[in-house]
Each structure stands twice: as C-alpha cells, then as structure tokens.
Image (cartoon, helix red, strand yellow):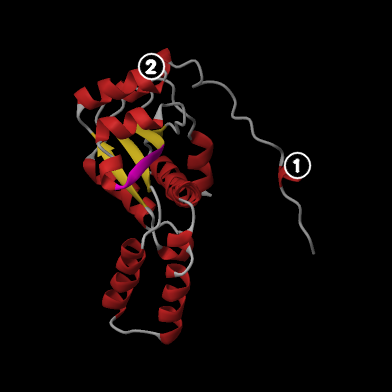
Amino acid sequence: MELLDKLNWRYAAKAMNGKAVPEEKVERILEAARLAPTSSGLQPFEIFVVKNQDIKEQIKPIAWNQRVITECSHLLVFAAWDTYTADRINYMFDLTNDIRGFKNEGWENYRQMLLNSYPQKDAEENFNHAAKQAYIAFSQAIAAAAFEGVDATPMEGFDPEAVDKILGLREKGLRSAVLLPLGYREEENDWLVNLVKVRKPMEDLVTVID
C-alpha cells in the first residue's frame, strides 16, 4: 500500500523550487533504473545526470522552454543505443559470464542467436527497440522517485537531435529518448498541483481472461 500511496501522491510537477535532492536519494533512483528488466538483459541505454546549470539552460529552449528543466535539481537524460552491435551484445554476455563465474551452453547459443539477428537489422529499428528498453528503466525511476518523496516530471517534449548535440551523444553511439527532471514541487506556482489525479477506471483498463 505504501508504494500505491506514493504513486497517488506523484504527478508531473510543472514548477520546481530549485531545492537540491540529496545525492543518496538520486543514487537510489538511479539504482532502481539500473535494476529494471530489459530485453535479453542487454540494458541498451545510458543515463546522463545533468547537474550543471549552464547545460540545463542550453536544454531549456529546445524543450519548449519548460521551466522545470532549469528549476530541477538533477536532469536525467535517458539515451538509447543508436543500434545493436556485436561488441555491445558481447559485452553484456561476457559480463554475465564473469559475474556468474561460469559459461552455459544454452546461454552461449542465445548469444549467437542475438549476434545473428540484431546487428543485421536496420539501425532505426534497433534504436526504437533500445528506446523501449530505456522507457522501462525510465518508468521504474519515476516510481522510485515517488517512493523517495522526490518529484519527477516525464518529458518527451524536446528536440532530441539538439539534446544529442549539447551532450555529444551521437559520438558515443547514443540518441536521447526521454528526459526526467528530479526536484521538489513549487506548489504556489504550479497550476497542476491541486487537481485530482485522473486515470481510467480499472474496468476500462484491465480485462481478465479466466
């Protein structure tokens, strides 16, 4: 129930007060994102934590001038792989083998299946798949922020190519997918803060097939 209470408390804050979020809270939010499930366990994305105010100021104009970009404490940028490569796939499989301390024939066969599939696909198709995995971690970060009593504002309203240029993402083989400012709501200047949360009723959302 505590998590549901926190999720009912959260909303997409439209104004933040600039107060710093304690680093230990940010670390736990990032850890929740790191622990998120992803397709084949590849984690095909990286998270950039922007604390530099000058960079936030550069991003604000290409994010529809949304004030939370510069008022937030930490701006998380979820950047997905621009495509899948053999090196990227092998890294995660080798890491798994190193951490678990053994090789498994079935696991190695699965590695080969991915190597024979993903790198041959269109780069845009691969990016879209990787971005979906980034969104899983993004959603988990939102829930973790709520649990920490930290406001998090999901943002797709920005120019990805411009953000990529500001952060030098393309040179790293990455493309920005979604933004998540973290901070604390400024209630007196946020038109959304006192509005009732609206979601579909359960019967319109969920179909149970017995």
Give x and y (percent) for residue 103: 34, 84
Residue 176 is one of the magenta-drawn residues: yes
Segment tinted magenta in the rendering: 173-177
Q: Where 22 falls versus 112 (above or below)?
A: above
Give x and y (percent) for residue 94: 30, 73
Q: Is residue 93 left or right of residue 154?
A: left
* Amino acid tagged 1: Asp
Instruction: Please tell me whether mark 2 sits on a helix, a strand or a loop.
Output: loop
Give x and y (percent) for residue 95: 29, 70
Foreground of the two, 161 or 37: 161
Query: What secondary structure characterizes most of the magenta part?
Result: strand
Residue at x 34%, y 17% (from the top left corner): 61
Q: Does residue 18 appear in the picture of this structure?
A: no
Graded by Cα atoms within 10 Å as few (under 14), some (14 to 19) or many (20 or more), the crowding at tag 1 reads few
Which dot, 1 or 2, sits closer to the camera?
2
Q: How many marks?
A: 2
Residue 156 is one of the magenta-drawn residues: no
Q: Where 183 falls versus 30 (above or below)?
A: above
CA gap between label 1 and label 2 equals 35 Å
Q: Where 43 falls versus 67 (above or below)?
A: below
Residue at x 46%, y 65% (from the top left corner): 40
* Amino acid tagged 2: Asn
The residue carrying mark 1 is: 204
Residue at x 39%, y 32% (from the top left corner): 160
Sequence-wise, the earlier of marks 1 and 2 is 2
Q: Quadrant of the C terminus?
A: bottom right
Q: Where 200 falls versus 66 (above or below)?
A: below
> Residue 111 occupies which quadrant of the picture?
bottom left
Instruction: Please tell me whether mark 1 sits on a helix, a strand or a loop.
Output: helix
Graded by Cα atoms within 10 Å as few (under 14), some (14 to 19) or many (20 or more), the crowding at tag 2 reads some
Q: Which mark is residue 65?
A: 2
